[in-house]
Amino acid sequence: MFVLVKFTEKHCAHQGPIITIKLSENTENVTACDGSQQTQLLEMLFEMNDDTGHWRGFKRTRVVAKQSGSGPLQNP
C-alpha cells in the first residue's frame, strides 16, 4: 500500500524533479518469436514527477542472455 503526500518543499532538489524507485527485480526465462530461449531481467518501478505531481508504475524488461537451439546460454 502506498501513501502519497505532497510536500511543499522538495527534499531531493539536487536529483531533479523526477524520482524513480525500483520496487522489485526478477529474472524470467521466455521463448522468443523465433523459438530461442531468452533470460530477461524484469524490473517493477515507481516514478513520480515532483513538479507536476504525476506518478506512474511501470515494468522494464531487458534481455540478459540468449540461447539459440540447444546450445548454452550466451550473453548478448
Image (spheres, grey):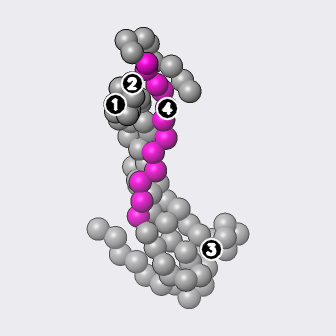
Residue designated by label 1: 31
Q: Which residue is mark 2?
A: 36
Count of marks overlaid on the render? 4
Mark 4 residue element: strand
> Is residue 1 positioned above or below 38 on the image?
below
Q: Earlier in the sequence, mark 2 or mark 3?
A: 3
Q: Nearer the viewer, residue 62 or 33?
A: 33
Highlighted range, magenta: 57-68
Magenta: main secondary structure equals strand
Name the residue at the bottom extreme: 8
Identify the residue position indicated by label 4 in the image. Answer: 64
Residue occupying image coordinates x 43% and y 20%: 67
Label whose residue precedes the other's in the sequence (1 or 4): 1
Camera-nearest label, 1 or 4 = 1
Looking at marks 4 and 2 on the same chain, the residue that comes earlier in the sequence is marked by 2
* Element assignment for label 3: loop
Out of 35 and 66, give the one closest to the viewer: 35
Inspect the image, locate mark 2, and give the three-letter code of the amino acid beneath it: Ser
